[in-house]
Image (cartoon, helix red, strand yellow):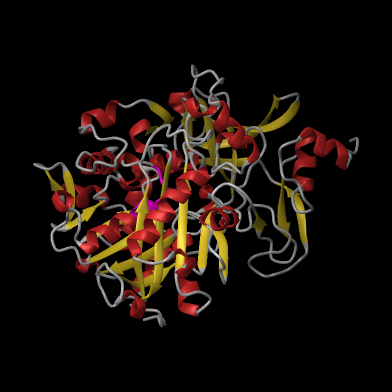
């Protein structure tokens, strides 16, 4: 695997406030790895990304790849975007995916390979990678299990 | 009970409001100055009595607009011993704290809200509003993410997702949200300074344009240009001023373990709004049955539903039953537990979006008893939850006559 430089990460995400606590997360996205900060002392997954464990106050926090298994905690269908020049035809789904690693660990993403009217709360989903703006982006698709 | 040394020692003595309109063609400073001068005059004070000032904005030290530096200069007030900017409902709490602590004697809070590029596609096409959006921090700019996360702006789209989660978890229908929309519009129809005065029905609510499914247009507050201001001083000094003092009885802000953002609240009842309500009741001699008026934040209808439950009018998830049993079918308004009125001015949904600061000015007017045909009978106590989001700086304030 080639190493993605800091400069490349900043260039790929020009509007994101990237700092020491989330740089590895965004670097991971560029090589199709979904990394979430995890406490090495007590095992807690820490998201939004923070440098210290909010449970045990350990600073031994390591970006760690998640399994990609999860479920739909909540979602909305965007019929009208804020940009006045954006088309309003097909609604866009935006979802908070509860990752299987920990209760309440939720990652904002999109749902693919699923008709809009088939999306249901608590539906099991798994991570897939799609291309968005010329770079890999995480998305989730139904596992087919209920 | 929690410690509350400021109980009934502070008073709101002046209020000032501008017109509410979709396009007033005025700067933020202009709106702020009109509200400020009206509030100082209403208080019966000289401008140089004002020695504390909270201007408008998320950035406590921002320059320009209706921030404290511009306002003080434009108002020509000699000196201040307490200054900052603030927003939503929490700015009121900060100003009251400053008076109580003795950093100033008379604090002026000025809050300006304009129809921003992030609230209205029409606004985004207006060159003056677009320039303000590019150079200022947009209201929805809390925690910006990448291109995709920008479709889930804090605050905004996540509330739509919470609406679906709420209905799923508690077996509710959209009616619970619609009751807030209809209640507020019916009150606004009697308020000459409301931007939306044409009455609506539950059918109108259900038929309104879908924006972020399941959130519809009539679930969202109405972006307008407006300014609001209040003057806060000590209860002692208030006795020598022209109006009946409106006392600050108890206040609380709120923060919850999770921190940011909307989607990370563990559950419906585990977020900062609920903390702020628990905090204010722990500091109050009053109980929920004493409330004549209730102002739950209505940036979106779901906020008002959440705050009604968090305040204790009913148990979590039971607002549908409460609203049904509290519905005045003749007037098409809510009377919680038979008597508590909500949003007598129309709220953000129908008077217009003021970040909730119009709750304070309306509450003061009603508690003074000066509102004529609009007057809530014998209004003596109110709970205001202005700008109470699911995570950032909710404010809960009890005012009494």
Q: Nearer the viewer, residue A103 or B62?
A: B62
Residue B77 is situated, as x and y percent measured from the top left of the image, at 53, 62
Q: Is residue B95 left or right of residue A49?
A: left
Kindly indicate the quadrant of the structure image that contains residue B36.
Answer: bottom left
**Part of the protein shown in magenta:** B353-359
Answer yes or no: is residue A39 visible: yes
Give percent across and percent down for residue B101: 50, 79
Q: Residue at x 18, y 63 (%)?
A: B379
- Decide: is B98 above or below B181: below
Where does residue B37 sit, x and y in percent of width and height?
A: 42, 55
Q: How many marks?
A: 0
Q: Residue at x 32, y 27 (%)?
A: B208
Q: Is residue B182 left or right of residue A49?
A: left
Residue B60 part of the magenta-drawn span: no
Residue B315, percent across and down?
28, 59
The structure residue drawn at horizontal position 63% and vertical position 57%, both measured from the top left corner, is B61
Q: Is residue B271 visible?
A: no
Is B329 on the left or on the right of B63, as rendered? left
Question: What is the quadrant of the N terminus of chain B in the image?
Answer: bottom left
Residue B150, placed above or below residue B61: above
Task: Specify the quadrant that holds the C terminus of chain B.
Answer: bottom left
């Amino acid at each position: 695997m080639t190493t993605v430089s800091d400069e490349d990460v900043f260039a790929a995400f020009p509007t994101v406030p990237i700092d020491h606590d989330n740089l590895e997360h965004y670097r991971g996205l560029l090589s199709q790895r979904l990394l979430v900060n995890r406490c090495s002392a007590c095992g807690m997954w820490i998201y939004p990304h923070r440098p210290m464990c909010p449970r045990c106050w350990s600073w031994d926090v390591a970006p760690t790849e998640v399994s990609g298994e999860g479920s739909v905690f909540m979602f909305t269908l965007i019929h009208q975007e804020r940009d006045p020049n954006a088309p309003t035809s097909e609604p866009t789904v935006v979802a908070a995916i509860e990752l299987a690693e920990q209760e309440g660990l939720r990652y904002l993403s999109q749902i693919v390979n699923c008709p809009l009217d088939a999306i249901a709360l608590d539906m099991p989903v798994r991570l897939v990678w799609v291309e968005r703006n010329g770079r890999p982006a995480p998305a989730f698709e139904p596992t087919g299990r209920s | 009970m929690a410690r509350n040394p400021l109980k009934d020692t502070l008073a709101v003595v002046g209020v000032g409001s501008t017109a509410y309109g979709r396009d007033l063609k005025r700067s933020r400073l202009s709106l702020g100055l009109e509200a400020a001068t009206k509030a100082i005059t209403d208080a019966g004070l000289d401008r140089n009595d004002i020695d504390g000032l909270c201007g408008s904005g998320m950035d406590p030290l921002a320059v320009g607009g209706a921030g404290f530096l511009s306002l003080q200069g434009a108002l020509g007030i000699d000196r201040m011993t307490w200054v900052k900017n603030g927003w939503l409902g929490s700015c009121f709490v900060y100003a009251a704290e400053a008076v109580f602590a003795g950093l100033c004697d008379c604090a002026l809070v000025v809050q300006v809200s304009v129809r921003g590029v992030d609230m209205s596609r029409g606004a985004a096409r207006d060159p003056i509003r677009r320039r303000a959006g590019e150079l200022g921090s947009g209201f929805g700019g809390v925690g910006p993410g990448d291109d995709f996360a920008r479709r889930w702006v804090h605050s905004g789209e996540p509330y739509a997702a919470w609406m679906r989660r709420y209905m799923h978890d508690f077996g509710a229908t959209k009616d619970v949200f619609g009751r807030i929309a209809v209640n507020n519009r019916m009150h606004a129809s009697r308020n000459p300074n409301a931007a939306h005065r044409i009455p609506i029905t539950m059918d109108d609510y259900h038929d309104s344009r879908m924006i972020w499914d399941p959130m519809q247009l009539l679930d969202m507050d109405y972006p307008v240009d407006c300014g609001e201001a209040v003057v806060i001083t000590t209860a002692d000094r208030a006795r020598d001023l022209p109006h009946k003092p409106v006392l600050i009885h108890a206040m609380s802000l709120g923060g919850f373990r999770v921190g940011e953002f909307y989607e990370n609240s563990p559950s419906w009842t585990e977020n900062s709004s609920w903390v702020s309500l628990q905090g204010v009741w722990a500091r109050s001699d009053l109980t929920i049955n004493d409330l004549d008026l209730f102002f739950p934040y209505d940036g979106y209808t779901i906020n008002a539903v959440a705050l009604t439950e968090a305040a204790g009018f009913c148990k979590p998830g039971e607002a549908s039953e409460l609203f049904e049993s509290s519905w005045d079918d003749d007037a098409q308004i809510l009377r919680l537990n038979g008597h508590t009125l909500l949003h007598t001015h129309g709220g953000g949904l129908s008077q217009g979006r003021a970040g909730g600061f119009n709750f304070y000015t309306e509450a003061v007017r009603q508690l003074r008893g000066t509102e004529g045909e609009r007057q809530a009978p014998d209004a003596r106590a109110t709970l205001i939850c202005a700008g109470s989001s699911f995570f950032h700086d909710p404010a809960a304030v009890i005012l009494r006559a």
